[in-house]
Image (spheres, helix red, strand yellow):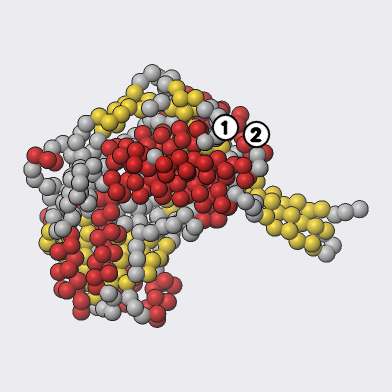
Amino acid sequence: MKVLINGEWRDSLSGKMFAVHNPATGDVVGEAPLCGEDDLRSAVEAAGEAFADWSAKNPRDRGKILFFAAEEVRRRNRELGSLLTAEQGKPIREAVDEINGFANILEYYYALSAGERGEYQNLRGYGHTLVERRPLGICGAIIPWNMPAIIMGWKIGPALVAGNTMVLKPARTAPLTCGKLAEILAGAGLPPGVLNVVTGPGETVGREIARNPAIRKVSFTGEGGTGRQVALDAAPALKQLTLELGGSDPMIVCDDADIRMAVEGVIRGRFYNCGQTCTAVKRLYVYESIADEFIRHLRARVEEIVVGNGMERGVSMGPLNNRPGLDRLVRQVDAARERDEGEIITGGRAPEGKNYGRGFFFLPTLITRVPQDSVLFSEEVFGPVLPIATVTDLDEALERANDSRYGLGASVWTRSTDVIARVTRELEAGIVWVNQHLRTPPEVPFGGTKESGIGRENGRRALDEYTEEKTVLIRLQ
């Protein structure tokens, strides 16, 4: 892989590369340029030169390029999914789904490109008023390794359709698929300089995106501490920001819930992508009256999960993506064990056997009787570990669910319309699911409250995030 700057794939100015490893085997699956601040500045310059022509293009023509790229992505979804599995670790089925999801996003913003948003009024005494939405200019995006294709789509789809140009930095442990997707966009007709992909460390490339005064907006998805640093670095230039900083999503299972349906919701909501999803189920609150039956069914299903290399047949959960993530997860589980914060009823360790070799594997884990002040509830647990607590009623469930500095997503499982009405009103979260969890179609706004971030991605709202309003008042003579 090379960096994409001004439509050309080139080596970094440093001439150095870094290896990308398969998290299931430790094998090298590719290399990417080790870029620095000078590479990023070159990308910003290219984006600036491309902006005038791109922003002047008919929005439908901008959208058509995304549509043509989406067709090619779908045609090559197995190839791209295999690359994603190799560098990220998720099972091939999940990887292909993510690649198709990237295509869905491009197609959605192509559909929105048919009409630009604006407002018109005729105000007596003032004349005609127009409120137009104009592109911001050069935008920067910093994306994580857990869902690189989907999150790349979330950022480039609305930004490019709105007429902006962009500099994008993928994560160091999963840059290869993003490079291929950018290559497909270029092949579909995206002009040079409109999308530039620069790989390298967050402390240099990422910080230059946040600091560079020519970049008008930064969209960051990742860890909260890093997000705060991005905000500080962007503050002097008063950049617009979208920050999606993770969460600790609660799931409430009421006594009238369909137990088997809710169990399957946990399996997908917690263990999809090895639990490495911002909106994964990370805290489970079950009514006492059904807890024994629910946990019995859940444990049986969890122990059916097959852990292994995502490219192998029958594997339903791959490894964690990287060593620091695995080490942090182990520390959290060990801390809960040492403090007697619950009972591990399954999992709680790495799997044994030669097939797991140098991979970053951890067994799917259930921990019951977890107190509200446990590290497993107060911190974001980014891996296949689920803490469980019982509650007596809805009042307690809501109080405990909202007792968190995070507020990204939440779900409730019930048949009661009264419960649904109250929970959706009172849960402190940017997105609330009812009898489902984790699903985030491109048509709906996505983002958090409290320390889960600011701004929104997806939907028509995302176009607003990548534009600014210009008011025009006309008085005819």
Screen quadrant of the N terminus: top left
Frontmost of labels 1 and 2 is 1
Q: Residue furthest front?
A: 75
Disc 1 residue crowd, few under 14, some 14–19, many 20+, Cα 10 Å: some
Task: Give the left or right position of residue 463, taking residue 305 as reference.
Answer: right
- Indicate the position of residue 116 as horizontal and vertical percent values: 65, 51
At x 20% / y 76%, what residue is drawn? 290
- Name the kind of residue labelled 2 in the image: Asp
Disc 2 residue crowd, few under 14, some 14–19, many 20+, Cα 10 Å: few
Assign a secondary structure to mark 2: helix
Q: Is residue 98 visible?
A: yes
- Indicate the position of residue 27 as horizontal and vertical percent values: 22, 31
Residue 58: quadrant of the picture: top right
Q: In this orientation, which residue lies closer to the viewer: 219 or 119?
A: 119
Question: Mark 2 = which residue?
Answer: 53
- Residue 245 lies, with reference to residue 50, above or below; the image says below
Q: Is residue 320 visible?
A: no
